[in-house]
Every structure is written in C-alpha cells, then in structure tokens.
Image (cartoon, rainbow, N blue to C red):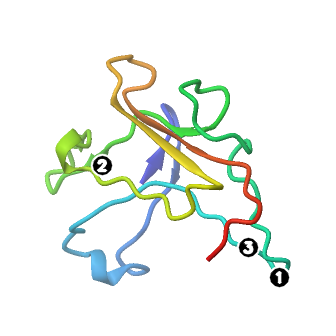
C-alpha cells in the first residue's frame, strides 16, 4: 500500500498478485531506464548522479516495508544490497538511516544517461 499522511494512493490486492498471498522474501526500490532504438539511454531522475545533495538527484526517503504483523520496518544496514548495472551513466548513494526525521532511511539515484554500453 502506498499512502501519504492523509490519503491511500494505491495497494496491490491478492487477486492481482496471488503469489504474494503469504508475503515476499525480498523487497526493492529503485529506478529503471532503457535505451531506445538509437542505443542512447535516457536521463534518470533529474539527470544528475548522486552527489550528497537531495536537491540534485532523484531520491527515496522514509523507506520502510511492512512485516508479517503489518508493522513498519526500516531496512537494516547489513541486510541491504546496492546494485547499479550502468555506473558510467547512473549512480546510487545509500545514506541508510539518516537520523533526520524528514528523511529517515534514504538514498539518491539517477544520472545523465547516454551511451551506456551493454
């Protein structure tokens, strides 16, 4: 379920995702960009790689998931895995649990795209 402080934005009912009736073993967050017929990959997010400034790159903040008891859980630092398959074009900076109430567990990602190769 995705919510704001006041509104439920969406949810994934068991009828649409029957394989998740008993939960999931892993969860993930991130971005995806695909090269078109020209072979040029598009920018991701604002087109800037992460540089430590949240106003420069795309970001996720206050990241958490729900446990089987429906309790919100922040990812645990040692249990996370970071993956960027085209580091020449895109980047990721995981700030983990920032300790800042507005950000919580946060990371920035994105990049300019371009000729990223195979």
**Which quarter of the picture shows residue 11?**
bottom left
- Mark 1 to mark 2: distance in Å? 36 Å
The residue carrying mark 2 is 65
User: Disc 3 marks which residue?
Assistant: 35
- Camera-nearest label, 1 or 2: 1
Q: Which mark is residue 37?
A: 1
Residue at 74%, 45% in the rendered image:
47
Image quarter in which the C terminus is found:
bottom right
Q: Nearer the viewer, residue 73 or 54?
A: 54
Q: Is residue 54 left or right of residue 5?
A: right
Q: Residue at x 75, y 54 (%)?
A: 43
Q: Quadrant of the N terminus?
A: bottom left
User: 100 left or right of 52?
Assistant: left
Helix, strand or loop status at disc 3: loop
- Name the residue rendered at 79%, 69% in the picture: 40
Distance (Cα) linking label 1 and label 3: 7 Å
- N-terminal-most mark, 3 or 2: 3
| Badge 2: residue crowd in 10 Å (few <14, some 14–19, many ≥20) | some
Q: Toward which corner of the image does residue 77 lie, by quadrant?
A: top left
Marks 1 & 2, CB-CB < 8 Å contact: no
User: How many marks do you count on the picture?
Assistant: 3
């Amino acid at each position: 379920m995705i919510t704001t402080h006041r509104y439920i934005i969406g949810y994934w009912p068991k009828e649409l995702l029957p394989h998740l009736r008993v939960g999931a073993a892993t969860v993930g967050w991130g971005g995806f960009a695909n090269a078109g017929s020209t072979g040029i990959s598009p920018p991701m997010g604002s087109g800037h790689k992460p540089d430590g400034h949240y106003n420069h790159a795309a970001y996720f903040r206050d990241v958490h998931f729900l446990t089987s008891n429906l309790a919100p859980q922040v990812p645990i630092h040692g249990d996370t895995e970071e993956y960027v398959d085209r580091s020449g074009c895109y980047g990721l900076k995981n700030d983990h649990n920032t300790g800042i109430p507005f950000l919580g567990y946060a990371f920035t990602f994105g990049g300019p795209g371009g000729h990223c190769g195979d």
